[in-house]
């Protein structure tokens, strides 16, 4: 059963979650080509002059870029989880509650504050839960972005399923207490947005 949504602005304030943009300018083009290749391979678009090998190459190229983007999102999320645990270690009351990184990962994925959910929707990210879940799962096993040659074609084809399973493993690795209803709140920013906000604060002093 889904937990009820948190009330905006209630509870202890956690550090803001700051997401950095993915800097590969060719990624949108490759992702679009991968999506078209998938449709062609399934007979939903005419294959035109492309052979199966070429379509598979385009499909896997796009999947690799998806993995890369998820890794970098996971890096930002993992940094935020570390910051949350720093806040726990500085508070004796929180230390007694059995909170672990998995506690805040569950909070982020399953019960993020309404303002966070609404902002993700404004950014056009409808299924942010899946993205956060898979990003955390992939980042848990890769210390750096894996080279394309290090990943099998089978992994790339089904990386979302692998990443979902990795997230489940991550959450089950150690016992943890769930975040209590309305006990925490946080805000989410794109890195450029957060920088501009800080500059405006500094200039107003």
Image (cartoon, helix red, strand yellow):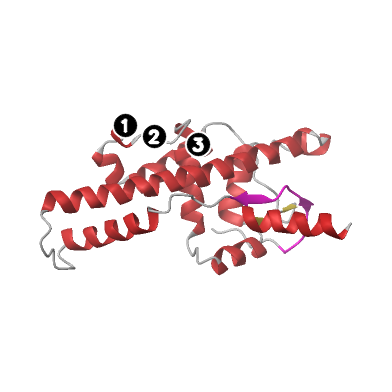
Q: Quadrant of residue 101?
A: top right
Q: CA distance from mark 1 to mark 2?
A: 6 Å
**Nearer mark to the viewer, of 3 and 1:** 1
CA gap between label 3 and label 1 equals 22 Å
**What is the quadrant of residue 80 in the picture?**
top right
**Mark 2 or 3, which is nearer the eye?**
2
- Relative placement, left or right, of 155 versus 72 is left
Q: Is residue 17 magenta?
A: yes
Q: Secondary structure at mark 2?
A: loop
Q: Which residue is mark 2?
A: 146
The residue that disc 3 covers is 170
Can I make out residue 99 in this image? no
Q: Earlier in the sequence, mark 2 or mark 3?
A: 2
Which residue is the extreme one toward the right? 205
Q: Position of residue 72 (x, y in %)?
A: 50, 44
* Residue that numbered label 1 is attached to: 150
Residue at 18% x, 68% y: name it.
45
For this rendering, which residue is in front, 164 or 61? Answer: 61
Q: Tell me, yes or no, if residue 152 can be seen here.
A: yes
Magenta-colored span: 7-19
Q: CA distance from mark 2 to mark 3?
A: 19 Å
Residue 168 position, x and y percent, is: 46, 41
x and y percentages locating residue 48 in the rendered image:
12, 65
Observer-nearest of 203 and 130: 203
Which residue is at 73% across, 35% downward?
86
In the foreground, 148 or 112? 148
**128 left or right, relative to 179:** left
| Quarter of the figure with the C terminus | bottom right
Label pair 1/2, CB-CB below 8 angstroms: yes
């Amino acid at each position: 059963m889904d937990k009820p949504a948190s009330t905006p602005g209630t509870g202890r304030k956690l550090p803001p979650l700051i997401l950095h943009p993915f800097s590969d300018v060719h990624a949108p083009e490759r992702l679009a080509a991968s999506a078209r290749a998938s449709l062609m391979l399934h007979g939903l678009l005419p294959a035109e002059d492309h052979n199966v090998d070429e379509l598979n190459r385009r499909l896997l190229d796009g999947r690799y870029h998806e993995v890369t983007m998820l890794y970098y999102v996971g890096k930002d999320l993992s940094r935020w989880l570390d910051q949350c645990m720093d806040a726990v270690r500085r508070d004796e009351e929180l230390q007694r509650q059995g909170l672990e990184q998995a506690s805040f990962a569950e909070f982020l994925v399953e019960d993020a504050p309404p303002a966070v959910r609404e902002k993700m929707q404004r950014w056009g990210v409808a299924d942010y839960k899946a993205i956060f879940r898979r990003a955390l799962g992939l980042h848990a096993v890769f210390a750096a972005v894996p080279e394309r040659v290090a990943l099998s074609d089978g992994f790339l084809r089904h990386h979302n399923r692998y990443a979902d399973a990795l997230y489940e493993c991550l959450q089950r690795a150690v016992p943890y207490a769930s975040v209590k209803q309305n006990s925490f709140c946080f805000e989410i920013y794109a890195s450029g947005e957060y920088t501009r906000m800080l500059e405006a604060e500094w200039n107003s002093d």
